[in-house]
Image (spheres, grey):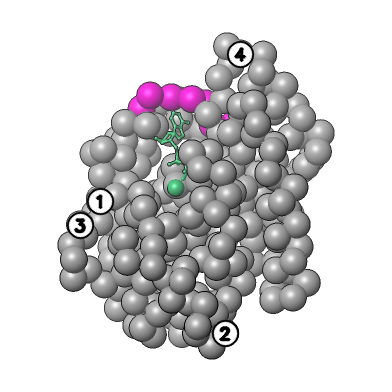
Amino acid sequence: MSVANQKGGVGKTTTTVNIAASLAMHGQRVLVVDLDPQGNASTALGMERGSDTQSIYHCLVEDQSVAEVTRPVEGIPGLSCVPATIDLAGAEIELVSLVAREARLKRALSAYDTSEVDYILIDCPPSLGLLTVNAMVACDEVLIPIQCEYYALEGLGQLLRNVDLVKSHLNPTLAISTIVLTMYDARTRLASQVADEVRSHFGGLVLDSVVPRSVRVSEAPSYGQSVMTYDPSSTGAVAYMEASREIAYRADTGQ
Ligand code: ADP
Ligand code: MG
């Protein structure tokens, strides 16, 4: 599942990390692939990184195996992560000259023993460039986080068109499977208006659980943790737990 939205700061990384943690806490085996040069998902999952860190960059550009760069996440059995480092910023350009440049991640993951995991979540960068295209070619489903703010829907049309393009040219089975409303502020009318608009547009794709704006959610990464372990009873953690339950239920029932 690719977690994508070319807007920055809409909750892609937060959603990736917390859904992944919560699926793992329910006994699923989950791999997070950090595909953003910023490496925020890696930070949030406590991945120590240095200049010699082997990362997703090496899988994409140097044919390193995914298994070799995968690392367990401390404190959450069943959860592992392929970290990203700033090297990845150059990959967008380096990939251009490589053969099958849109399918590098797909290739890397197809050599990975996927019987080892139940879910792979790919945290995309805030752009529709080659890295995001690689994610969409490698995955079956796209999860789009939408921030309940003004402008939230702007740019969404472009994202949907890109998914369609990848679907028609590169990955015929690709589908947008899930939309998660994030940073919902129940005190504002705007948030509920945005939520209503998204639901009327996307119907059943939108998860029932809505992630509230919560300080605990934003604090967790600075402790190298998901909010699921940092403060499991907080409103944000409970919402992500519910969201992951819906995702697991859909996967089991094929809905
Ligand atoms: P993206 O990956 O789309 O750029 P992030 O997940 O990094 O977005 O979120 C952007 C910022 O908003 C981060 O500082 C994050 O901690 C904060 N944030 C995300 N979700 C919430 C939430 N539910 N409540 C409060 N802050 C949040
Ligand atoms: Mg991010």
Any mark on residue 48, and which? 3
**Is 25 rendered above or below residue 1?**
above
Please state which of residues 59 and 8 is positioned toward the viewer in this rendering.
Answer: 8
Give the spatial CA distance, label 4 vs label 3.
39 Å
Q: Residue at x 36, y 53 (%)?
A: 38
Which amino acid type is marked by label 3? Glu
**Is 106 rendered above or below residue 14?**
below
- Which segment is the magenta one? 209-216
Task: Assign the C terminus to one quadrant of the image.
Answer: bottom right
Q: Residue at x 18, y 70 (%)?
A: 52
Which residue bears the numbered disc 2?
Answer: 100
Please state which of residues 157 and 16 is positioned toward the viewer in this rendering.
Answer: 157
Which residue bears the numbered disc 4?
Answer: 188
In what element is the residue under mark 3?
loop
1 and 2 marks in contact (CB < 8 Å)? no
Asked where in the image residue 224 lies, by quadrant, the reply is top left
Q: Is mark 3 within 8 Å of ligand 2?
A: no
Judge left or right: residue 28 versus residue 220: right
3 and 1 marks in contact (CB < 8 Å)? yes
**Is 189 rendered above or below residue 198?**
above
Asked where in the image residue 99 lies, by quadrant, the reply is bottom right
Residue 110 seen: no
- Nearest-to-viewer mark from 3 and 2: 2
In what element is the residue under mark 1?
loop
Which amino acid type is marked by label 2? Ala
Give the spatial CA distance, label 1 vs label 2.
32 Å
Q: Residue at x 56, y 44 (%)?
A: 7
Judge left or right: residue 193 versus residue 233: right
